[in-house]
Image (cartoon, rainbow, N blue to C red):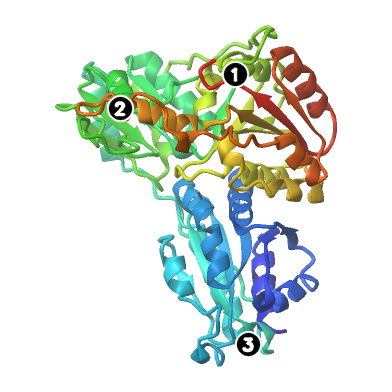
Amino acid sequence: MNGAEALLRTLADAGVEVLFTNPGTTELHLVGALESVPELRGVLALFEGVVTGAADGYARIAGKPAATLLHLGPGLAYGLTNLHNSRRANSPVVNIVGDHATFHTAFDPPLNSDIAALGGWLQGPVRRPEDAAGAGPDGAATLAAVLEPPGQIATVIMPADVSWSDGGTAAPPMPPRATPAVSQDVLTRIAEVLRAGESTALIIGGTVLRESGLLAAGRIAASTGVRVFQELYSNRVERGAGLPMFPRLGFYPDQVLDQLHGIRHAIVAGTKAPVSFFAYSDQPSLLVPEGAQTHVLAEVGQDAVGALDRLADLVAPDTTAPVTEPRRPALPTGNLTLRNWTDVVAALLPERAIVIDESVSSGTALAAATAGAPRHDVLMQTGGAMGDGLPLAVGAAVAAPDRPVLALVADGCVMYTVTALWTQVREGLNITNVVLNNRAYAILRQEWEYFSNRPGHTNPDGNPLFDLANPQIDFVGLANAFGMPASRVTTAEQLAEQLSRALADDGPHLIEAVIPAAA
């Protein structure tokens, strides 16, 4: 077999099932190899940012790696934004990047670039097989690397002549390193902190935000009185009736400092101590209050869920975690507002839904509204790079075709990766897209007001660079252009009607919900 088939066969034999791609000439032998590896499903996207974001969404829901196939350095560069989010989400992703034939690069052709440098920016290993015989082993090593706890992105650069040359063989899987356990000494020390009775916050993230971790944190809180907070942005959160609900840390430094006011200890599990998203001249970067001690129960990449379970057995052996009772808000009426649209979603959210939350400033009421809804998963963009919502929905729907996917995406975010709608239609994915259209970069307006209220700044008015109303974007027309049914709503009644209809139908839909930013 040639090198391309050896690489793809190695990945497929190890359990990789999906390859998201926007290929070019240097990847044609890899595209051809897909025909010889039918276990590996190819999913086409029109832009590499959709490719990489979809791989992220797939990995988060499937719990195993996806692969991407990208065209040379520019293709990887187009995909780096959502790979940044993937890295922050600790999602296991295998990037395959085609390159010029080894003998061709010496002539510095137009698309020649330093692909290894771009791959290294993602802080994962980068491999380049020298010949077809190395393609399989490099593929196996790359796959093992992405599965290293807590998960990472690794890259294989495939020169065209390595892909087309014979002499390749599939390599057997390489077992990844096991997730490190937390030592008993650490558990004993943290238990002593909790038993001391001083004001303490437990900050949880990563895999802790699934059922087992949430119940363990709930037991600890019920027994010790510790205040539990969820990290600001999480890769996957299980929510809904029957689970404990904990507040998320705020976006702004003063919000977090208010939430943690008075604590003497901060315990972190599966995440890091909170840091301000941006720097402000009059606020600290580290948001643990001055004088409070930080204790690491479990580093990112350690078995944080197991550590919390064992800690709960130490400090709350006979305690049951309080959970959220089933409840739904009544369907609201009237013009859409920042609050009532979330009540519509909560009232109609189906069982086992996957919610993509890139609602940004429009979604501040979403968590409270959906707390008692049927059990569901929430995926967020974790690295702060906008445009991940629609691609995450693609990957999630490919990973779980039997589950409804609801993508709640702000208007500005949609425009980064709007071509994801085309892939949704092409693949017939069961996705309901709700575009929250406030015709502005409202989060920047908030930041501008925050900035303008600082000493020395006296302009409280919005800046025209945050305005998306001139010209207005026709999201219904955009969806229709990709072959997707779409509607525009301005009232809660209309949103309820269109959301009910979209969730009941197969295939993708788009609803443009016009919500004034100050409503």
Rate crowding at label 1 as few (under 14), some (14 to 19) or many (20 or more) other CA atoms within 10 Å.
Answer: many
Q: The residue under label 1 is which amino acid type?
A: Thr
Few, some or many residues within 10 Å of mark 3 (<14, 14–19, 20+): many
Q: Tell me which label, 3 or 2, sits earlier in the chain.
A: 3
Q: Position of residue 413 (x, y in %)?
A: 56, 40
Q: Position of residue 348 (x, y in %)?
A: 72, 18
- Label 2 sits on what residue type? Ser
Q: Quote the CA–CA distance across marks 3 and 2.
A: 57 Å
Residue hosting label 3? 161
Specify the farthest residue to the left.
291
Res 171 → quadrant: bottom right
Pinpoint residue 174: horizontal percent, then vertical percent: 54, 67
Cα distance in 3D space between marks 2 and 1? 34 Å
Which residue position holds label 1? Answer: 370
Mark 3 is on which residue type?
Answer: Asp
Foreground residue among 159 and 385 = 385
- Please give the residue where the numbered disc 2 appears in the rendered image: 452
Q: Find residue 29 and report its horizontal and vertical position in percent.
A: 71, 79
Which residue is more in the foreground, 61 or 274?
274
Left or right of 427? Residue 472 is left
Residue 349 appears in the figure:
yes
Q: Observer-nearest residue: 349 or 331?
A: 331
Identify the residue at image location x=61%, y=46%: 57
Image marks 2 and 1: residues in contact by CB distance under 8 Å: no
Disc 1 from disc 3: Cα separation: 53 Å
Which SS class for mark 2? helix
Give the residue displayed 67% in from the left and 63% down from the top.
22
